Image (tube, helix red, strand yellow):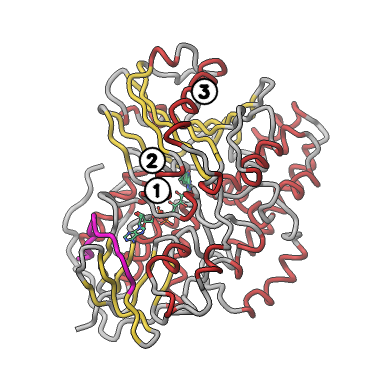
Amino acid sequence: MTKPIVIIGAGFGGLSAAIRLRARGWPVVVLEAGDQAGGRGRVFERDGHSFDAGPTVITAPYLIEELFNLLGRNLDDYVDLVPVDPFYRVRFHDGGHFDYTQDEERLLPQIKDINPRDVDGYLAMAEHSKRIFEIGYEQLAHVPFDSVMDMIRVAPHMMRLGNYKSVYSMVASYIKDERLRQVFTFQPLLIGGNPFTASSIYLLIHWLERKWGVWFPKGGTHALVKAMVQVLAEVDVPVHMNSPVEEILVSNGKATGVRLENGEVIEASHVVSNADPSFTYGQLIKSEHRSKHSDRRVKNVRQSMGLFVGYFGAEGDYNDDVMHHEILLGPRYKGLLNDIFNRRVLTDDFSLYLHQPTRTDPSLAPEGKSSFYVLSPVPNQKSGIDWDQEGEAYFDRILEHLEGRLMPGLRDRITTKFHVTPRYFEEELRTPDGAGFGPEPTLTQSAWFRYHNRSEDVEGLFFVGAGTHPGAGVPGVISSAKVLDRVVPDPKLAIPLPSQVLGRVAK
Ligand SMILES: Cc1cc2nc3c(=O)[nH]c(=O)nc-3n(C[C@H](O)[C@H](O)[C@H](O)COP(=O)(O)OP(=O)(O)OC[C@H]3O[C@@H](n4cnc5c(N)ncnc54)[C@H](O)[C@@H]3O)c2cc1C
């Protein structure tokens, strides 16, 4: 009998890989260390509120539809995705805001109001973003990027498109107003990049959002996770929770299975790791099996920033004033990012992302209440910040700021609250340095320079997820699973999918 492919981790990357490999006829087993699937996309249920822990901005939904279609299902039989408009309301520190939308006819007058001379600049920048998208996304996101020839093939295009420049300097070459520059450069932060150092290849995010929009699943992002686990159950793929893998077993240079922390051994034909690649090489594979990814090399990977996320439920709602997605820019931009990414100090000021899912789906809170989360990029664990000491006070400062700026009376209306810090990412999600998004997407850690989807050290070991090509964010990690179609061979004896639909997730 064909041994299964074992997938370590049930994040969006691991679940997508399981679907794709099962669709090709492989038997698949998913092992998740935590007590629920989703990884960063898990859910926290508190006092009747449902808080998505991480991803909330769903872009390129066709990637998820594709997964369900591979198994002969339709996504919309499982989850309702609704468009979110505006994508974000970006609020400037000195007052005023910008509604970032898909609709050019609404974008241009807002740009004109801020600086009429930037209208043409924006149009040229959007065109540039489209050209990067056509190469960086359409041609490269779903294919392996593990031979130096791949790099040589695309390097001239990348050079021509100026991908050696940062996102900020590229946008600044088109747009003069500092507020507008911030509106069109914060996007790399959503995948762990500093706009001042992330390669302008990530300017493609702008076109990706404009092309496919921003969506939210009814029931929250976790409804997507639930649906993926359900559809896997329908095709006989078990997702085992509370099953941390301690070691990837290697014999004669080939992955042969895994050993769980409880000692159980599961033999495998191939192993796919959705755990962070630095963690996988550094902690799950004995050093004698690694020649390229030595401990030293793994430690030298520069990890992205950390995240502080405060979740809270409140009486009533703020629907009149607060959009579903809000970006609250602080008084400093470059200086703040430098403090977070390079100086690694906790600052008195912040720029925030505020999520109000109950504006789109009131069922995520008890009757008469609403649910929120507020995210603040912070230094990763390399900073040495003692979050047990700082966390509560930091959250209070953020709530005070929200109350003064946007949500009057907030602190008296809060009925439940808790937070996570980079410690959660380090300890519960097993991410080196407690990084929010895995390795930082700098030029020298992107494309060919990122962890490859096929291990060079261990035959039959593959990677999916934020740390590998193409990178973080839900579309990125789903695309990383697509790469497996090219690098994992077909099974000798394909196991057909059960023809019958066994059941559906209640919408
Ligand atoms: C707060 C926050 C907000 C975000 N917002 C957005 C957004 O709006 N839109 C967007 O597109 N992206 C967003 N992102 C990024 C996106 O969530 C991630 O890039 C993506 O979910 C990562 O998926 P993954 O599969 O790579 O990894 P993860 O979600 O980290 O999953 C990896 C899984 O592997 C498991 N694991 C690790 N080690 C082991 C082991 N030894 N044994 C078994 N299991 C193991 C972990 O427990 C985890 O469940 C956000 C991220 C965060 C943190």
Q: What distance separates the C-alpha of mark 1 from that of mark 2? A: 6 Å
Q: What distance separates the C-alpha of mark 3 from that of mark 1? A: 25 Å
Q: Are marks 1 and 2 in contact (CB under 8 Å)?
A: yes
Q: Amino acid at mark 3?
A: Arg
- Decide which of 237, 334 is in the foreground and name it: 334
Q: What distance separates the C-alpha of mark 3 from that of mark 2? A: 21 Å
Whether label 1 lies within 8 Å of ligand 1 gets the answer yes
Residue under pointer 2: 53
The kind of secondary structure element at disc 1 is helix
In front: label 3 or label 2: 3
Q: Amino acid at mark 1?
A: Arg
Whether label 2 lies within 8 Å of ligand 1 gets the answer yes
**Image point (40%, 33%), residue name:** 419
**Image point (60%, 48%), residue name:** 188
The kind of secondary structure element at disc 2 is loop
Tell me which label, 3 or 1, sits earlier in the chain: 1
